[in-house]
Amino acid sequence: MVRYFILDIDGCVTIPFQSPDWTAITRIRDLQQQSKYDEHVPALSLCTGRPLPYTEAVAQWLGIRNTIIFESGGGFYHPITNELTWSPHFSDEIRRKSLELRKWFQDDVLSRFPGVMLEFAKKTDVGMVHTDINEIRKVYDIAVEKIADGYPEFEAHYTEVSVNIIVKACNKASGLQFFADEHGVTADEIAYIGDSSGDTMALEWAGAPYAPANAIEEVRKRADVMNGKATRGVLEAYQQIIARNMKNMSGNNVPAQHKQNTASEDQ
C-alpha cells in the first residue's frame, strides 16, 4: 500500500523555463485533494534540488500539506506549522566548506559563463542554472574537478538546466528517510518519481520508483517508466499507484485505516 507519492519538480512536475501543463497540474491537485478522504489515493509531497521559495510555491499549486524536501535533502519545510528543519548532516564544518565552494563559483566560474546564474536562495548546497545544456555540462565537469580537489564530502549532479553541488549525506534518499521517519511509514509505503542523476538514490530507496518518459537512461534502469513526459508522466504514475492500491486493498478484508497526517490540512 503506497501512502505517499513524492515528486521531483524539474523534469517531472514541470519542464524548466516552460509554462506548466496546467491541465495535468490541475488533475494532479484534484487527486491530492481526494487523498484527504479516499484511502486509495496517496498524499503528495515534493523532493527537489530547488530552493525553498520555489518548492513552497509548487506545494501551494498542488495543495500539499505534508513535509516537503528541498535542496536535495538539505532542508525540510512543514507547511502546516510554517517550520523549517535542516539536515543534521549540515554541520558547521560542512557549512564552512559549502560557503567556500559558493565563493569559488562566484569568483572563478561566473566570469567564464556569463549566462549561468547562481541560485542565491540556497543554504546547504551550491546550485546554478542555465538554459543551454552544453554550458551546463561544461560547468558540471568543472564542479566535479573542484570537488575532487579537497571537498570529498560533496558530490555534483546535473539536469538539463542546472548543476547542484550537494553534501553527499544530504541527498534525496536521506531526505526520503527523514520524511518516512517523521510520518511513521516505511520505504515500501512511499512512491517516488524522478528523471535525472540526482534522483537515482531516491529511486533505489523508494518502494515504488517511477520515471517520466523524458528520464535519463541511468534513471530508467531503476524505475517503472511512464509513457508520458514530465507532468503527464507524473499524472500517469499517480493513476497507476491509485489503481494498484485499490487492487491490493480489494483483496484485504481489513480496511486500511492508516491515514496521512491530515488532521490540520484544512487550515
Image (tube, grey):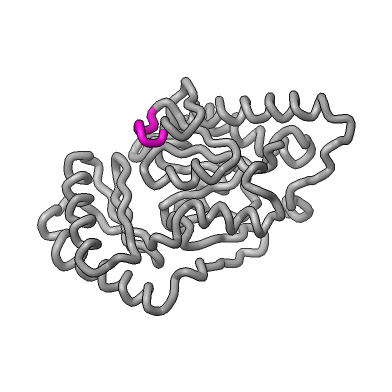
Query: Does the stretch in magenta take in 258?
Result: no
Q: Residue at x 42, y 31 (%)?
A: 221
**Which quarter of the rendering shows the C terminus?**
bottom right
Where 207 sits versus 253, above or below?
Answer: below
- Residue extending furthest toward the bottom: 92
**Boundaries of the magenta span:** 214-219
- Residue extending furthest toward the top: 227
- Residue extending furthest toward the right: 253
Q: Residue at x 69, y 55 (%)?
A: 183
Q: Nearer the viewer, residue 61 or 228?
A: 228
How far across and down, in percent of the image, does residue 108 sit? 14, 64
Quadrant hosting residue 38: top right
Number of on-image labels: 0
**Which quarter of the rendering shows the N terminus?**
top right
Left or right: 25 with respect to 195? right
Q: Is residue 170 visible?
A: yes
Where 82 sits versus 257, above or below?
Answer: below
Left or right: 245 with respect to 130? right
How far across and down, in percent of the image, does residue 203 sit? 49, 41
Q: Residue at x 41, y 52 (%)?
A: 49
Left or right: 208 with respect to 265? left
Q: Residue at x 62, y 43 (%)?
A: 190
How far across and down, in percent of the image, does residue 104 sit? 20, 68
Where 249 sits versus 57, above or below?
Answer: above
